Image (cartoon, rainbow, N blue to C red):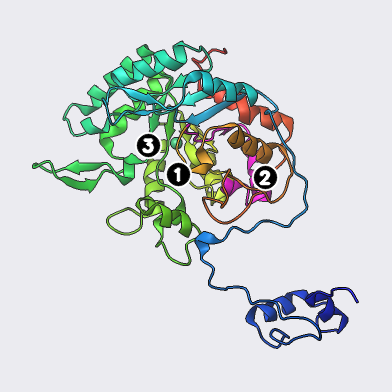
Amino acid sequence: MGTVNRREWLTRTGAVMGAAVATTGAEARGEGDLRGETMQGQEPAPKPDASLKLVDYQPKSMLHVPVTVVEKAAFPVIDMHTHLTVRNAQANARQSRRAMPPEDLLKVMDARNIRTMVNLTGGQGERLAGNIAGLDRAHPGRFLTFTEPTWTEAQRPDYAKWQADQFAAAKTAGAMGVKVLKTLGLFLRDKDAAGKDGALVKVDDPRFDPMWEQAGALGFPVAIHVGDPEAFFLPTDRYNERYEELANHPDWSFHGKDFPAFKAVLEARDRVFKRHPKTTFVALHVGHWAENLPAVGEMLDTYKNVHIEIGARIGELGRQPRQSRKFFDKYQDRIMFGTDAVPNGTETPQQIFGLDLYQIYYRFLQTEDEYFDYAPAPVPPQGRWQIYGIGLPEPILKKVYLDNALRALPRHTAP
Ligand SMILES: [Zn+2]
């Protein structure tokens, strides 16, 4: 007699009776099954160690499903959301550290059909000029650089005019838009008379109204990120679906202290969208609420000056593939491709610039593959789930990869 595994034996003896789910549940609890009993001639299987730590758990999917390798995007791509240059903290805040030489960036871009990368964190003044010289001017059409507001000056009495002048100078220097980091709403604080940190500055603080207006007048789209994943505003406990991520990065939690509630941040943002209808906003990370596409749709229906981008959120979009597919159908003229790519580091695998990253995005957008990793990492870094492709048709792909970004960047000329 050959080896009979336990399930086969149970099935033969009628112990399973087709009730696979019920049986599995009973097995898991170790109730009423034959665990511990020895079949004739067979040693009992060693009991698995149920105290395996979550950090050590790396399950491999046993699904036999199609794997489609998409080497190149179906159309030339504008990656609307990258961070190619970072402030050089060690040396001089007026300089940037370029995380990867442009030649190395271009190799990946050419291999993956990326026409243009938008470098959002270009900075201001000398740093901005240096970034534009090294990227935009050195490789025309392949790189576009955005400027950023100077929050450290937000306390000065003439801030509105001062910042407006800075934006005008940035445009002359060649900047293509403005990037607003989540600093606004979560970190930026007013100072008291002694220079000590006071209350958090609200996203819709009226002192910034002239700045939003000026961006619109200059033809600068405003790529804005406020808030963060909804789970980051909840306790880091056993019920938090991003527990491991928050445990790895405790400083990413916005729960407690005097942090605003998640919805309060979005409501303040919406008041900015409403007050500045002539300014084009690109609400990054799927409008900051990829977990709630109906709410993002409602926001897009309400504010026609707002577009969205998908960077670092295919983990969310891909775990709700049917709802995502309908969302892309309905808002196909308002969604831009982006990745939030950073060309160095290991902390955020879902963002590490390289051949792997783009292949995953293309697989999600172009195929109907099932149950695959949303990031090149041994454990899904943003939550323990897998994603499904949404197989967009070519007309929608062309808009998402290229045309929608081109409309938001009217001063950009093709390479
Ligand atoms: Zn980003």
> Pointer 2 and pointer 3: residues touching (CB < 8 Å)?
no
Up the image or down, 235 lies above or below 111; here it is: below
Decide: few, some or many residues near mark 3? Use Cα within 10 Å; few <14, some 14-19, many ≥20: some
Q: Is residue 312 visible?
A: no
**Relative to residue 27, is residue 121 drawn left or right?**
left
Q: Amino acid at mark 1?
A: Glu
Extent of the magenta region: 315-343
Q: Is residue 320 magenta?
A: yes
* Front residue of 71 and 389: 71
Examine the rendered structure and indicate whether residue 251 appears above or below residue 98. Answer: below
In the visual, does 407 lie left or right of 270?
Answer: right
Q: Residue at x 47, y 62 (%)?
A: 240
Q: Nearer the viewer, residue 90 or 366?
A: 90
Q: Is residue 12 left or right of residue 294?
A: right
Q: Amino acid at mark 2?
A: Lys
Q: Amino acid at mark 3?
A: Leu
How far, Cα to Cα, is label 2 from label 3? 29 Å
In percent of width and height, residue 125 lies at 29, 19
Q: Which mark is residue 181?
A: 3
Q: Which mark is residue 290?
A: none
